[in-house]
Image: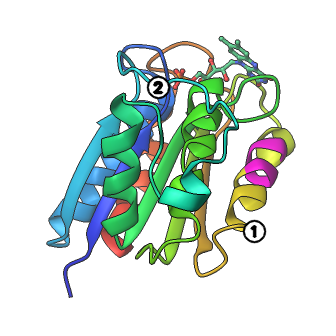
């Protein structure tokens, strides 16, 4: 059955490596007949959570910016895919800032049950993604009806275009099977 899949690309870089992984994932997921939307955080206004916790009483954030519609889309998606560059062996600040803004939805009837993580880094070692995966797992421990279904890591990718065709195909295949 067709799924509603939201792909969130958090690189601030135009045509970033992790964004390319996200686009290929989308291609594959569309080929399988899913309803797929990509949100690129680049150029979006996503303010820092102020920690006021008003959302825990009202279910809504007091801030009005692009995070509101993105978190609403997350809430109603079946699958959420995060794409991020590895920054200092963790996720990008853009992605973390968005995750903090999901506080209004964690106690709601969010629909998503499957999460994917796509990441790229300059480092060539497989373990270079570990801090980023741990960060996502920390977020998931609060969204415990969802699980991390797949992780794809493009190591050795410093400049845009550095991701191998093989890796891009893997992203497409992952999207196809999502
Ligand atoms: C602020 C910053 C921090 C980075 N930190 C790391 C790092 O800790 N380890 C690493 O291997 N690469 C690091 N990189 C390189 C990026 O992860 C790499 O260029 C990646 O492919 C960028 O993805 P993007 O093109 O989607 O933005 C860093 C780059 C920047 C700009």
Q: Quadrant of residue 149?
A: bottom right
User: Quick check: is 49 in the magenta stretch?
Assistant: no
Q: Please report contact status of discs 2 and 1: CB closer than 8 Å, yes or no.
A: no
Q: List the residue tagged with mark 2.
A: 46
Tell me the number on the disc at residue 113. Answer: none
Does 103 appear above or below 2?
above
Residue at left 77%, top 48%? Answer: 135
Determine whether, in the image, residue 38 is placed left or right of residue 31: right
Helix, strand or loop: magenta stretch: helix
Question: Ligand 1 falls in which quarter?
Answer: top right
Quarter-wise, where is residue 48 in the image? Answer: top right
For the residues labelled 2 and 1, the Cα–Cα distance comes to: 23 Å
134 or 177: which is nearer to us?
134
Give the side of residue 123 with respect to residue 95, left or right: right
- Disc 2 vs disc 1: which is toward the camera? 2
Residue designated by label 1? 141
Which residue shows up at 62% across the image and 33% down it? 49
Image coordinates of residue 22 in percent, x first then y, are 39, 43
In the image, which residues are magenta? 131-135
């Amino acid at each position: 059955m067709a799924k509603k899949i939201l792909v969130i690309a958090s690189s601030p870089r135009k045509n970033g490596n992790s964004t390319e992984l996200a686009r290929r994932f989308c291609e594959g997921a569309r080929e399988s007949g899913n309803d797929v939307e990509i949100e690129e955080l680049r150029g979006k206004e996503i303010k820092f959570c102020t920690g006021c916790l008003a959302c825990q009483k009202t279910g809504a954030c007091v801030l009005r910016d692009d995070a509101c519609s993105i978190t609403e889309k997350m809430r109603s998606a079946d699958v959420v895919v995060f794409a991020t560059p590895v920054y200092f062996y963790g996720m990008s600040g853009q992605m973390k800032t968005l995750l903090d803004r999901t506080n209004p939805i964690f106690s709601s009837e969010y629909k998503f049950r499957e999460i994917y993580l796509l990441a790229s880094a300059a480092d060539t070692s497989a373990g270079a993604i570990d801090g980023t995966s741990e960060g996502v797992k920390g977020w998931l421990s609060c969204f415990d009806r969802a699980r991390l279904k797949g992780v794809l890591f493009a190591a050795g990718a410093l400049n845009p275009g550095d991701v191998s065709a093989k890796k891009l195909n893997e992203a497409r295949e992952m999207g196809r099977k999502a």
